[in-house]
Each structure stands twice: as structure tokens, then as C-alpha cells.
Image (cartoon, helix red, strand yellow):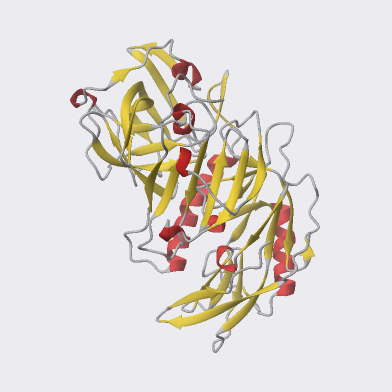
């Protein structure tokens, strides 16, 4: 499985304090509940949560990694317990990309966090007992003619991990760090681009607590469960295309239904974890650095009998996290193949960095290939290394985890990533996402 092109060249242009890397191209080799799917697909613009800030590429990555560490804790937690007799699946929450939506009749515009690691769609609602500050006015259901509470006997209410019946279907939806949203489950018209879809089930949150939500007005779950937007639409396919982390003006895109296509692609099957049915698990068989297939045990990325472990693809985690032994092997091989000294300053906040020569304009880095079942994903170098002239370092944008491994969005830059829930596959296709 070793790559035929063991190295890539990074052309490093020193400009002001930041080093921009120009990299030579790599040599590549539970469905809806009584929902009527739209006749055509739609697309929604995505904006990175830090897009309005004046940050360098490394600063933007550092901010995202700080959020990502909280998300990793959420994703890695197997269950959360609110009562001694109640154990429920945990969900990811927060994320890195905001999607534009409109809610109600007349429609009110909001930005919500796109999250492939959870299912529930929710927004903050009046009257609010405990709400975080958000950039737009809080949704007022009394001002919408299309709002209605869902009864406890509804299928969506039954799909909630925790619910009760009083004034309609009341819910508590929790995330792995005990952040939560609590309110009433309702139905409303949602507008995505120029497509309006009635009777979407969502959480009207009146008591919302925790970190990581304040970038938007709520969250849109795109997981595999019945509460997610994709399942409710009855659309079997969606994709996203995320621009480079240093593309401050580029717009990423979420595509749903007939819009979610890719011509030249590689495809790998999705696998199921009954303990965490919402996550998108992939079968990772191995990793090659340069010409070397890493000595990683075959069970390293497997889902364990208790539901722990496994390898998921996630839009809301920034860098890729590999189970500890696998990351150690990756780190060791990178050090052996790089022709630079290891930087031990920790200035970039990443696990493995190298010292850049002061007068260097080119740096060789080993090629990196992820071997999924039926698909070898040959990553372009800009999707796994980052350089900064001010700090004088070049770093690997990956880290170590305990248990679950995660394929982050930095590694998914400038790819169309197609989730096909009918065929149960994930596909990757190279693209210039700011030109879609």
C-alpha cells in the first residue's frame, strides 16, 4: 500500500510574519420520519467561526484546536449519566462552521453551528429562562404562524434520549461536557437558501447552558439518527466542501440532496457503532508515511466491544487525533524522514514541530496516505502540515487521543466529502472549495 511518490515539496514564501506554504500537488491515485423530501437539493453557505478575526494561519489553528480539545472530550465520552439509573449516548455539540438558515413564518435569519457529531436541531427561544448571548435576536415562536408544538406521541419525541410530557414534548439534550439544551420539541418551517421546508422538528430551547454555542443561535445536527436534519428531510445524501483554514474570504458550502455530487472520487463504507449511532465511523486499515507503512496493530482503529474506540470523520474537530500508539508510530516515522531538527519550544501548541532553516525557501515533507477500506486517501501536504516564519516552525497538524480517533476538518480542506446514507458510504473528491 506504500505510495509511489514518497515526498512532496513545500514552497515556502516568507511574507511579513507569516509563512505561506505553496505545496506541489500530491500524486493521487434510520431514515426520515414521515417527511417529504424536496424535489431538488439545496446548498447553504458555511462560514468559519473565526472568519471575521484578524488572525494568522497558525493563530486561527490554535484557536480552533482549543475548541477542538473540548469537542474531543465530548466525542470520546461514551455515555453521560444524569441519574444513577439513566445512561444515554453523548453528542458532540459546538463546531467550527456556521450555516445560514431562516426559521418561521415570516422567516427570521440565523446562523447555526453545523454539527455532524449530533442529531438535534435547536435554537434558543423566548421566553428564555437561561440563554447565552447570541449575535441575532432570540427566536419568538409567538411571532411565527407556522410554529406548533409536537405531541408526546410523535415519532420524533420518541427518538429523544430524554423527554417528558407536560405542555407538549419536553426534552433535555446533553453534550459530553454536560453542556445542554432544554425546552419543548416543536415543528416549524426552515428555509435553506431559497428552499423552504415545512414541519421540521426542532428543539425550542428555553434553558441552554454550556460552552461553545455562542458563535451562533443554536445548532443543526447532521448525524445519522432520526432527529437530524438529513433524516427528517428524507434525503439520502449530503456533502460539504471546506475552504483552506487561511482562506479568510472563501465561503465553504453544505450541499444536500441532488446538489451533493462528486465526479472523480474515492469511496469507503460507513460502519455502525450501536453505542454511538449518530457518528460517522470509517474503517481505517493503515497509514503510510513516505514509503513506509506504519506498524500499527489492525485492531487499533476498531470499535471495541463496549462501544469505545473506532475512527470517525467529523466536520467540527479541527485536527486529526489518532489513538496514542498509532500517533506515536506516525510521529516517530515523520521525525526519521524529515531533514529538519525537532522544535521543542511548544510555541505552536502542536505535538510535533520542526525548526525551519532561516534562509530556506523549500522544505521536503513525507507524503501521507490514509488507507481506508477500499480507498487510499493521498493527502496534499497543506492538509497535514502548517508553517509559520514568525515562530520559525513547521508542524504536523495531528495529535494523540485515548480511545476514539477522529479525522478532522484540517485534513478535509478543499475536498468534497459526500455522505451517502442510502449506500452507507463516504466519498472524497479534490476540489477548490472557494470556487464551488
In the displayed structure, 414 sits above or below 80; it is below
Residue 35: x percent and y percent?
43, 22
Residue drawn at (34%, 21%), measured in percent from left and top?
186
**In the image: residue 80, left or right of residue 272:** left
Q: How many marks?
A: 0
| Picture coordinates of residue 252, whole percent (x, y) | 41, 54
For the N terminus, which image quadrant? bottom right
Q: Quadrant of residue 361?
A: bottom right
Side of 335 where 80 appears, left or right: left
> Is residue 94 something one can see in this rendering?
no
* Residue 233 lies in quadrant: top left
Up the image or down, 209 lies above or below 163; here it is: below
Q: Position of residue 356 (x, y in %)?
A: 57, 81
Tell me what residue is drawn at x 71 percent, y 62 percent.
330
The one of 228 and 387 positioned closer to us in this rendering: 228
Q: Is residue 146 visible?
A: yes
- Location of the C terminus (image quadrant): bottom left
Q: Residue at x 78, y 54 (%)?
A: 296
Across and down, in percent, residue 31 comes to 54, 25
Please determine whether, in this image, residue 57 is positioned above or below residue 36. Answer: below
Farthest residue to the left: give it: 143
Residue 408 lies left or right of residue 233; in this view the side is right
Q: Nearer the viewer, residue 91 or 414?
A: 414
The relative height of residue 123 versus residue 68 in the rendered view (above or below) is above
Amino acid at each position: 500500500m506504500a505510495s509511489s511518490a514518497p515526498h512532496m515539496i513545500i514552497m515556502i514564501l516568507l511574507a511579513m510574519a507569516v509563512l505561506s506554504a505553496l505545496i506541489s500537488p500530491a500524486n493521487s491515485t434510520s431514515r426520515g420520519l414521515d417527511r417529504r423530501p424536496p424535489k431538488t437539493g439545496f446548498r447553504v453557505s458555511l462560514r468559519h467561526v473565526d472568519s471575521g478575526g484578524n488572525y494568522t494561519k497558525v493563530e486561527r489553528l490554535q484557536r480552533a484546536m482549543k475548541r477542538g480539545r473540548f469537542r474531543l472530550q465530548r466525542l470520546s465520552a461514551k455515555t453521560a449519566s444524569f441519574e444513577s439509573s439513566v445512561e444515554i449516548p453523548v453528542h458532540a455539540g459546538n463546531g467550527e462552521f456556521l450555516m445560514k438558515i431562516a426559521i418561521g413564518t415570516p422567516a427570521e435569519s440565523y446562523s447555526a453551528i453545523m454539527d455532524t457529531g449530533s442529531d438535534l436541531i435547536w435554537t434558543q427561544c423566548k421566553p428564555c429562562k437561561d440563554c447565552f448571548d447570541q449575535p441575532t435576536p432570540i427566536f419568538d415562536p409567538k411571532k411565527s404562524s407556522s410554529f406548533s408544538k409536537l405531541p408526546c406521541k410523535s415519532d420524533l419525541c420518541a427518538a429523544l434520549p430524554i423527554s417528558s410530557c407536560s405542555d407538549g414534548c419536553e426534552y433535555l439534550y446533553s453534550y459530553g461536557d454536560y453542556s445542554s439544551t432544554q425546552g419543548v420539541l416543536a415543528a416549524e418551517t426552515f428555509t435553506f437558501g431559497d428552499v423552504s421546508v415545512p414541519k421540521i422538528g426542532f428543539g425550542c430551547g428555553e434553558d441552554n447552558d454550556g460552552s461553545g454555542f455562542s458563535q451562533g443561535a443554536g445548532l443543526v445536527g447532521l448525524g445519522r439518527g432520526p432527529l437530524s436534519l438529513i433524516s427528517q428531510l428524507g434525503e439520502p445524501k449530503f456533502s460539504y466542501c471546506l475552504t483552506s483554514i487561511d482562506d479568510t474570504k472563501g465561503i465553504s458550502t453544505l450541499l444536500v440532496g441532488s446538489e451533493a455530487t462528486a465526479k472523480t472520487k474515492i469511496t469507503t463504507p460507513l460502519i455502525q457503532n450501536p453505542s454511538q449511532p449518530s457518528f460517522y465511523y470509517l474503517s481505517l486499515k493503515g497509514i503510510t508515511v513516505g514509503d513506509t507503512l506504519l506498524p500499527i496493530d489492525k485492531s487499533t482503529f476498531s470499535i471495541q466491544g463496549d462501544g469505545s474506540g473506532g475512527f470517525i470523520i467529523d466536520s467540527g474537530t479541527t485536527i486529526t487525533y489518532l489513538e496514542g500508539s498509532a500517533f506515536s508510530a506516525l510521529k516517530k516515522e515523520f521525525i526519521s524522514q524529515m531533514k529538519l531538527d525537532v522544535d521543542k519550544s511548544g510555541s505552536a501548541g502542536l505535538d510535533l514541530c520542526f525548526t525551519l532553516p532561516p534562509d530556506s525557501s523549500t522544505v521536503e515533507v513525507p507524503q501521507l496516505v490514509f488507507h481506508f477500506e477500499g480507498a487510499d486517501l493521498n493527502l496534499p501536504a497543506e492538509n497535514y502540515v502548517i508553517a509559520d516564519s514568525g515562530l520559525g516552525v513547521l508542524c504536523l497538524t495531528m495529535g494523540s487521543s485515548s480511545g476514539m480517533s477522529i479525522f478532522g476538518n484540517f485534513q478535509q480542506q478543499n475536498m468534497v466529502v459526500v455522505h451517502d446514507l442510502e449506500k452507507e458510504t463516504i466519498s472524497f473528491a479534490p476540489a477548490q472549495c472557494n470556487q464551488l
